[in-house]
Each structure stands twice: as C-alpha cells, then as structure tokens.
Amino acid sequence: MPGKRKKINCPAGVCAVIVAAGSSQRMGGDNKLLLELAGTPLLGHTLGAFERCDVVRDIVLVCREQDILPYTTLARSAGISKLYAVVRGGDSRTTSALAGLEAAPADTALVAVHDGARPLVSEALIAEAVYAAAEHGAAAPVVPVKDSIKRIENGRITADVARDTLAAVQTPQVFRRALLERALGDAARAGRTYTDDCAAVEAYGQPVFVTHGSYQNIKITTPEDLLIAQAFLQGEAD
C-alpha cells in the first residue's frame, strides 16, 4: 500500500482524459452522466474536480458521438475553462482512452485518465497520482479490499486469498504520455482490450506505482451507487 513520499517538481503539461463513452446499461438505460447529483449533473462534478485541481492544465473529454454537443454545452455552462477538446470514443475502453490521448495538446507530458462516472474524486487524490507518475512513470490510486476474498470453482469455495495483498484500483490513472501511447497503441493494433489503462501499461512491461485512493471515489454504475454518492455529499454538507 502507498506510503509517504516527497513531492518533486511536476511537469507543466498535465492533461486529464475523462472517459465518458459508456452506454449506462446497468443504470437502466438512462445516461447516468446527466443524472443529477446534489443538483448538478454527475459529469459536472467530475469535470469540476479537474477544473479545480492546480496540477491539471487541460481536459479532454471522450464520449459517444451523440453526447458531444450536450456534454460540450454542460461543460460550458459549468464554467470548465480547461476543456481542450471533446472527441468521439471507440468501441472499447482501450480505444476510447487512445482517442483521448491522441487529442491531447502536443506538449502534454503526463496524461491522467479518469472515469467520467467517478464524480467524487478529490483534487488531493488527483495531485498525488500526478506527482507519483512524474517520478515513476505510471501511478494509480488504490484502496485496501475490506471483504474476505475467496477463490470459487464449480460453485464451491476452493481457497482463501490473502486480503492484505489485494487492493481495488481507482482512477485517475496517470502515465507519461509516451509510455501510454506505446502501451495503448500496441494493444489496439493487437486487438487487445483492457478494463483499465494500468493493465495495458503493465502488459507493456511498466510497473505502476500505487497512491492513496478513497472509498468515496466510487464509480457510479447502478442506481444504488448514485444513492451512496448522494449520501457522501450530504455528509460533507452536514
């Protein structure tokens, strides 16, 4: 698990790639990123966190073609001044992240890839991952697994898995641009898809440094997740 570390000078060109090209199938068909969370569309919370984070210079938003106009309008109405581009995603997480990476400014040094459906990410969590990636090349926030983990085969528990060796990985996952370009490019050419960008970078042979995640940095996938996020926000307001 992550420990304390000194900050180093961070490259000036940090671009957040917000991946928001999903279909929201497990939300019952509604576009979850436009659902209101404490009076603001969910995506507005996500964009706002990167807008407020001092280490992030630019934002590229990746989405479905039909969402380009509404998301651009949302960002404009929310005062997102860092928005550099809104681009169409691909048919997988890997190709969508690559599309966002290719749209980033030419002088981008670090790319922070974040799930659009993680609206409660904090500026401190973003910054820690960025500083770690500046030092190590690749970094991602994690949280320890709370539940006991079992290995299941043929409907039966076959083994315990040591909980202290496991963690749940979150976003933003931050990488040196050239590293992520090579890893995602290789994956796309080979037709490989990954559920997150760390997996592509790990497959390329680069270790990923871990930083502190947050149990509040949840990914909104189902209606129940939206209720949990609302409860977190209500707790902060009380």
Image: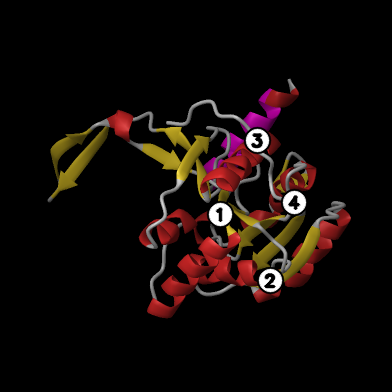
Tell me the residue that label 2 is attached to: 103
Callout 4, which amino acid? Ala
Image-quadrant location for residue 195: bottom left
User: Could you tell me how far apart the alpha carbons at marks 1 and 3 are, in whole angstroms?
Assistant: 31 Å
Which residue is at the far bottom? Answer: 189
Residue 166: image location, x then y, percent: 34, 36
Earlier-in-chain disc, 4 versus 3: 4
Disc 1 to disc 2: CB gap under 8 Å:
no
> In this figure, which residue is indicated by the disc labeled 3?
230
| Mark 4 or mark 3, whichever is nearer to me | 4
C-alpha gap between disc 4 and disc 3: 34 Å
In terms of sequence position, does the residue under pointer 1 or pointer 2 come before the other? 2
Residue 175 badge: 1
Which image quadrant for residue 131? top right
The residue beneath circle 4 is: 12
Residue 118 seen in this snapshot? yes
Above or below 58: residue 21: below
Closer to us: mark 1 or mark 4?
A: 4
Residue 134 position within the rendered picture, expressed as x and y whole percent measured from the top left: 60, 47
Residue at 67% in and 76% down: 65
Q: Earlier in the sequence, mark 3 or mark 2?
A: 2
Instruction: Tell me which corner region of the image, top left, top right, bottom left or bottom right, holds residue 32.
Output: bottom right
Question: The residue tagged with tag 3: helix, strand or loop?
Answer: helix
Judge depth for marks 1 and 2 and give the one in front.
Answer: 1
Question: In the rendered structure, which segment of residues is drawn in magenta?
Answer: 223-235
- Distance (Cα) linking label 1 and label 2: 16 Å
> Mark 2 is on which residue type?
Ala
Q: Residues within 10 Å of mark 3 (few under 14, many from 20)?
A: some
Residue depth check, mark 2 versus mark 4: number of the one nearer the observer? 4
Q: CA gap, disc 3 to disc 2?
A: 33 Å
